[in-house]
Image (cartoon, grey):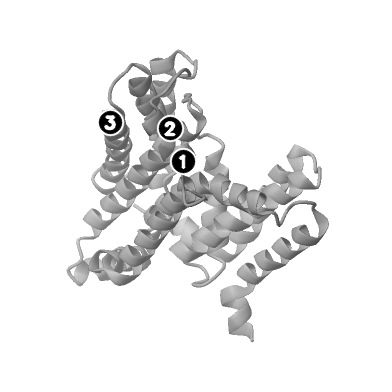
Amino acid sequence: MNELISRYGTAIGGALVFAFFAAAADNFLSIGNLLTILRQISFLTILAIGFTYALIASELDLSFAAVASLAGVVCGGLVHAGLAFPVAIAAALMVATAFGAANGLLVTRMKIPSLIATLATASIATGLGFAFTNGVAWVGRWDRNFLWLGRGDILGIPVLVIWMVVIAAASWFVVSQTRFGIWLVATGEADEAARLAGIPTRRMKLLGLMLSGFLAGIAAVLLTASLSSAGPNGAADFLMKGIAAVLLGMTMFDPGKPNVPGTVVGSLVIGILGNGLVLLGAPYYVQDITLGLIILGSVAISASALTKAAFSV
């Protein structure tokens, strides 16, 4: 019983929260509202999975929201300027991945703790976003095919939900079923032992941070297509929510360790909480207070893993 609670207690708690809102909030169980929840958490889940890759390698990426904002600006600006949207998407993904690579090189080559390195690159990304836009979001008429990436549906299922499921399933497979994933986990759990065993630990950390940047780029493209606008702070609100989703995920399935299934469920719990509180008419600040409590509670369980990721060199 203790093991069951340890591994699945948070997930069970999330199910109880779902049941509470189902009983207390009108229209919570409507198909439209449930799809809205899944649509709303799609960006959060993709960004949080990126953060999970970095944390599995025992590194923090506090730049993912700022990088996503910059990538959105790049994508939106190029589409707004009339370039073919595949070119704009490729440019956004390249920019985001380049920031991930820069984070990885700062950590592995210059030995700067990831907490400091990614805070610095976040500031750079934010500054570049404002420089490119002069602080004004890109808005206007957009290519319909591009907008479909964030607004379309397949057989009644929002395409954003499909993107989220595909990325989550692929990430779970990569982490749990491939040699790269095994090496990434080994690097995060015991860096020196992994290195002595022949695992290229510096490359693993670099790739973990690059994947975080790449997924930030994907989320940026989808967010831009969904909103048909892109601003220098477009993804800023996802920073704390993304961190909270990963920390919440570390309290379930494989307690104390970052894991993809936990991150997905953590994102879902946060989405359910936000949606349910809105339907109940709770003040907006209640969501912020609840998010803070989630982070504090999660850190109490995962403190050692976070300390290692933040300050290791």
Image coordinates for residue 193, horizontal then vertical, percent: 27, 71
Compared across the picture, whether 244 is left or right of 154 comes to right
Res 152 label: 1
Identify the secondary structure beneath mark 2: helix
Q: Amino acid at mark 2?
A: Leu
Compared across the picture, whether 93 is left or right of 41 comes to left
Q: Amino acid at mark 1?
A: Gly
Q: Give the mark, 3 or 1, whose residue is nearer the N terminus.
A: 3
> Which quadrant of the view contains residue 104?
top left
Compared across the picture, whether 88 is left or right of 39 comes to left
Residue 177 visible in the shown view: yes
Residue 222 visible in the shown view: no
> Which quadrant of the view contains residue 309?
bottom left
> Disc 2 to disc 3, how far (Cα)?
17 Å
In percent of the image, x 24 and y 55: which residue is there?
202
| Mark 1 surroundings within 10 Å by alpha-carbon count, few (fewer than 14), some (14 through 19), many (20 or more) | some
Image height of 160 relative to 175, above or below: above
Contact, mark 1 vs mark 2 (Cβ under 8 Å): yes
Residue matched to label 2: 147
In percent of the image, x 67 and y 67: which residue is there?
15
Q: Amino acid at mark 3?
A: Ala
Q: Give the mark, 1 or 2, whose residue is nearer the N terminus.
A: 2
Image coordinates for residue 197, horizontal then vertical, percent: 20, 72
In depth, the one of 302 and 251 nearer the eye is: 251
Identify the secondary structure beneath mark 1: loop
In percent of the image, x 69 and y 43: which residue is there?
288
Q: Give the mark, 2 or 3, whose residue is nearer the N terminus.
A: 3
Residue matched to label 3: 91
